Image (cartoon, helix red, strand yellow):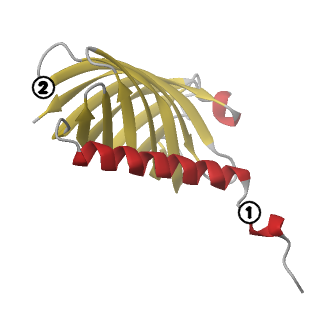
Amino acid sequence: MRKSHSSLLLHPSLRRVFSFAGAVALFSFVMTTSRSARAEPVLAGDVHGAFVVGDQRGPIKGGLGFDGRFGYRLSLIVLALTPEIGAGYQHLAGDDPLAELSVTRVFAGARLGFGAIIQPAIFAHVGYGWLSATNVDRSDHAPMVDGGLAIDLRLIPHISPGVHASYNALTTSPSSLHWVDLGAHVEIEF
């Protein structure tokens, strides 16, 4: 039996993932082979407020959190690609004192920035998270993802403050936890 040509094609979402990966690989190659490209380690700290969206929105409203990130920024003229790893903690609470959650997570991903002095960026991470309820016997662990936008000010050499917004999801069972972070960060280049 002969396979049809349509069965050999990738699903449209997989094609987008491969296209994005190819673009990042090409960008990385150009950045590392160009004479005007430079690369430096970057250490970053984020603080943010959060509000819960989705199924958990009822008892849990929002909270505060922080992340630490380490990466290696590859810069070429007005573009910057930073593959990075990190870890974070988020405390979420609501009106009910029994409805308090803590989320600890580790992640890896990248951010892509455009511009010289004011640098907007997009970022995404995948990782793993641990969820625990503060006042009841409940805990869980599951994969997590986040993605968002940032704006950095690159006025001072080696120090870049900025603001960010991100959408976060921890896919626990039977329901998942989704929240939006709004916060500030500072990146230090070595």
Could you say whether the residue bearing mark 1 is in a helix, strand or loop?
loop
Image point 20% across, 38% down: which residue?
Answer: 37
Image point 13% across, 15% down: which residue?
Answer: 156
Q: Amino acid at mark 2?
A: His
Could you say whether the residue bearing mark 2 is in a helix, strand or loop?
loop
Q: Could you say which is closer to the camera, residue 16 or residue 95?
A: 16
Residue 48 sits in quarter: top left
- 45 left or right of 10 in image: left
Residue 154 sits in quarter: top left
Q: Could you say which is closer to the camera, residue 167 or residue 105?
A: 167
Q: Which residue is mark 1?
A: 9
Q: Which residue is mark 2?
A: 158
Lower sequence index among marks 2 and 1: 1
Q: Amino acid at mark 1?
A: Leu
- 123 over 47 or under it: above or below: below
- 61 left or right of 28 in image: right
